[in-house]
């Protein structure tokens, strides 16, 4: 009899938790259209900003642009061997970062799969709802943390990629200057 009373008390606790979650969810339903409108508005703003950034980028990349101002920089250009070594080093780092990113993506997939499994178990009522909600929160925070770190890694990869592209452009410019100088030397100028 005591066991049944304990089971009834346990089921009543679970029922109250589920009713509370249902109440919280029902309160949020009226906010969905407002949030959808906000998302659409923000997407439009993002599109406009990206378009403006692209226009400015193209304007700066155009040699005859009025926005483009340049000045000669003092200093010495690195030789071909140094540039090759830098490019090789950056390519190795980029490869390492890509591997790390793939590992983090796999971890993210595993964590996501686990959180999805836990959510499904919660809906099926297989485990204690309150304990499961805490586990889901822990996994979601882990996902957010991994996502933040992944985004930082992607940003760092972009920086390395931009540096590699810049060094490649410098290399090509130096090769062109060298070729011009050799032509001038051949012509006796």
Image (spheres, rainbow, N blue to C red):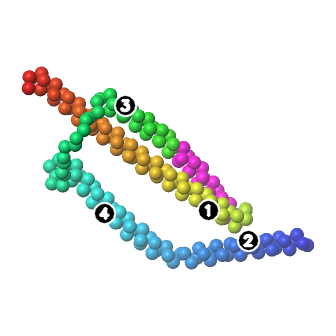
Question: Which class describes the residues within 10 Å of circle 2: few (<14), some (14-19), or many (20+)?
Answer: some
- Tell me where residue 44 sits by quadrant: bottom left
Query: In front: 110, or 78?
Result: 78
Q: Residue at x 18, y 46 (%)?
A: 71
Q: Which residue is mark 4?
A: 48
Left or right: 143 with respect to 19? left
Write down the residue under mark 1: 137
Distance (Cα) linking label 2 and label 1: 18 Å
Q: Quadrant of residue 172?
A: top left
Residue 154 in view? yes
SS at badge 3: helix
Q: Nearer the viewer, mark 2 or mark 3?
A: 3
Q: Position of residue 81 (x, y in %)?
A: 32, 28
Image location of residue 26, percent across then percent down: 58, 76
Q: Quick one: which residue is furthest to the right in this view?
A: 1
Q: Residue at x 43, y 39 (%)?
A: 94
């Amino acid at each position: 009899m005591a066991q049944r009373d304990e089971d009834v008390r346990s089921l009543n606790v679970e029922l109250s938790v589920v009713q509370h979650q249902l109440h919280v969810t029902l309160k949020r339903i009226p906010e969905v259209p407002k949030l959808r409108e906000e998302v659409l508005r923000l997407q439009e703003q993002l599109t406009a900003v990206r378009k403006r950034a692209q226009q400015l980028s193209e304007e700066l990349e155009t040699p005859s642009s009025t926005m483009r101002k340049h000045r000669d920089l003092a200093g010495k250009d690195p030789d071909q061997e140094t540039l090759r070594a830098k490019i090789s080093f950056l390519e190795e780092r980029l490869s390492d970062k890509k591997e790390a990113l793939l590992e983090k993506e796999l971890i993210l997939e595993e964590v996501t799969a686990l959180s999805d499994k836990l959510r499904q178990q919660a809906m099926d009522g297989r485990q204690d709802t309150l304990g499961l909600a805490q586990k889901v929160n822990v996994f979601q925070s882990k996902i957010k943390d991994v996502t933040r770190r992944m985004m930082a890694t992607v940003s760092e990869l972009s920086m390395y990629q931009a540096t590699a592209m810049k060094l490649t452009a410098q290399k090509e410019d130096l090769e062109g200057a060298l070729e011009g100088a050799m032509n001038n030397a051949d012509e006796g100028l």
